[in-house]
Amino acid sequence: MKKTAISILLCAGLAFSVQSCKVTDNYTAPVLPAQAQAVNGGETAGEQPLVPWREFFSDPLLQRTIDQVLADNYDFKIAVERITEADAYFRQSQLQYLPSLDAGATARFGRNNPTPGNSQSYQLALNTGWEIDIWGRLASAERAAYASLLQTEAVKRAVQTQLVAQTATYYFRLLALDRQLEITNATAALRREDIETMKLLKDAGIVTGAAVVQSEAQYYSAKVSIPDIVQRIRETENALMMLMGRQPGKIERNTLAEQNLNMVLSDGIAADVLRNRPDVQAAEQNFRVAFENTNVAKANLYPALNLGGMLGKGAANLRNFFDNSLLYTVNASLTQNIFSRGAKKAQIKINESRRRQAYYQFVQTVLQAASEVNNANNLFAASREKEGYRARQISSLEKAVEYNKELLKYTSNTTYTDVLTSEQNLLSAQLAGVNDRLEQLLALTDFYRSLGGGQF
């Protein structure tokens, strides 16, 4: 009778397993809508290769700073630890396939009235249980855990890319501030010379005392901006030191003029290239987690097939414990909670909704990536064009300052106000020229980040 019952359970499980292919779905990568396939498509789309970040950022001192950030940044360390955690969850999911094995020892004492005397029994046994994955529930759970691990690894790469780009951004801003400070100090020195020149011209009766005090005001106007620039330099250095996980200090660096701006950017980037971005990869793995969790919810609708058994020794007293007292049992079971079916169907709908949400988030991430690539490309082109015009503007303004000073000395066709105006315009143009070059460097950094970073 017992053999018959077990056989019936095994046959039922086999019959159910034949239909198991209908329970879960095979995973396929999410397909982008047609309108999201390419950015500025064309035949050249997707030609931009990923290069190592050391080639992208060739300044040796910047490279050293980035190395220090990647070695000691705490956000990056947290991301690495999350990978360790996700890997442990994945390995834990793989252990679900293994049977359980428990060892136990029991001793019982009692009295049954009116039967005289005491009763006692002793038992030492191994118990095992094993769930047969006939519906693919355990396999789907394992794949979900693996996708979660891949998602965490992608997040780590995203943090890595973000740190490289953020370090480069701070570094380039620091170089721009250095150049602004250099220009402002040079301007203050020239205006100090102007004061002496105006005093001599006043003594010669060419200008009035108003020109002298105006020249002094212009000098102090330049000097008063220097502490602000120095403060911004210190703040930027401190931000970089914080990225490195260190106390405030100095950052060794090169100059703005030494930075390489000869890289050629692609006009169009294919959507497949954007899949290299860690955030896009993380979004895709998030979609797979939701997909596999939906499979798990579907498999939970069906009964669980479990095999079990016990092997051990038992006796009524310890003297006979190791005599012929072998005990064993073998069992198979199909279990299903009858009243939870409605809740399980609701869980399927919940997971299917989460899967759709994950798909929409994936598409949105790709579109955001495309927009960032396009914006960085446009900013780089615009700032490069501006820099060319700015160089001509600065050259003309330098001549204007020189001519106005000469006219002030030898003719009455100009006033010191003309000199002040031309000097102020020159300073503004020089500072704007620094910003033009900084914009190009930041656009390159954004392009690096928008493609998902280079090779590590």
Image (cartoon, rainbow, N blue to C red):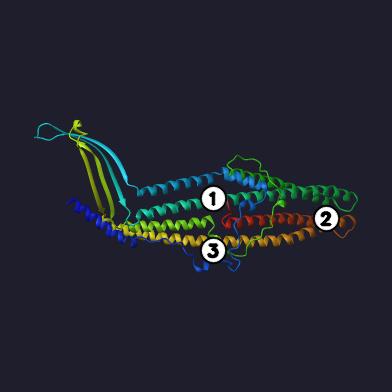
Q: Are marks 3 and 2 in contact (CB under 8 Å)?
A: no
Work out whether mark 3 precedes mark 2 in sequence or the reverse, and give the earlier one.
3
Residue found at the far front of this picture: 324
- Badge 1 marks a residue whose secondary structure is helix
The three-letter amino acid code for the residue at tag 3 is: Ala
Residue at the disc numbered 1: 159
> How crowded is the residue under tag 2: few (<14 C-alpha within 10 Å), some, or many (20+)?
many
Judge depth for marks 1 and 3 and give the one in front.
3
Horizontal side of residue 408 vs 365, given as left or right: right
Residue closest to the eye, 70 or 406: 70
In space, the residues marked 2 and 1 are separated at their CA atoms by: 55 Å
Is residue 115 visible in this depiction of the protein?
yes
* Along the viewing direction, whichever of 413 and 365 lies nearer the viewer: 365
Q: Is residue 324 above or below residue 374?
A: above
Task: Tell me which label, 2 or 1, sits earlier in the chain.
Answer: 1
Q: Position of residue 44 (x, y in %)?
A: 61, 66
Q: Whole-Å distance between the Cαs marked 3 and 2?
A: 59 Å
Residue 355 falls left or right of residue 226: left
The residue sitting at the left extreme is 114
Question: Mark 3 and mark 1 in contact (Cβ < 8 Å)?
Answer: no
User: In the image, residue 231 lies at what x, y percent?
Assistant: 67, 45
Upstream in the sequence, badge 1 or badge 3? Answer: 1
Q: Tag 1: Cα neighbours inside 10 Å, few (<14), some, or many (≥20)?
A: many
SS state under label 2: helix
Q: Mark 3 highlights which residue?
A: 271
Quarter of the image holding residue 358?
bottom left
Residue at coordinates 48% horizontally, 51% vertically from top-left? 152
* x and y, in percent, of residue 90 in the image: 42, 49
Inspect this view and state whether residue 239 appears.
no
The residue to which callout 2 is attached is: 416
Residue 372 placement: quadrant: bottom right
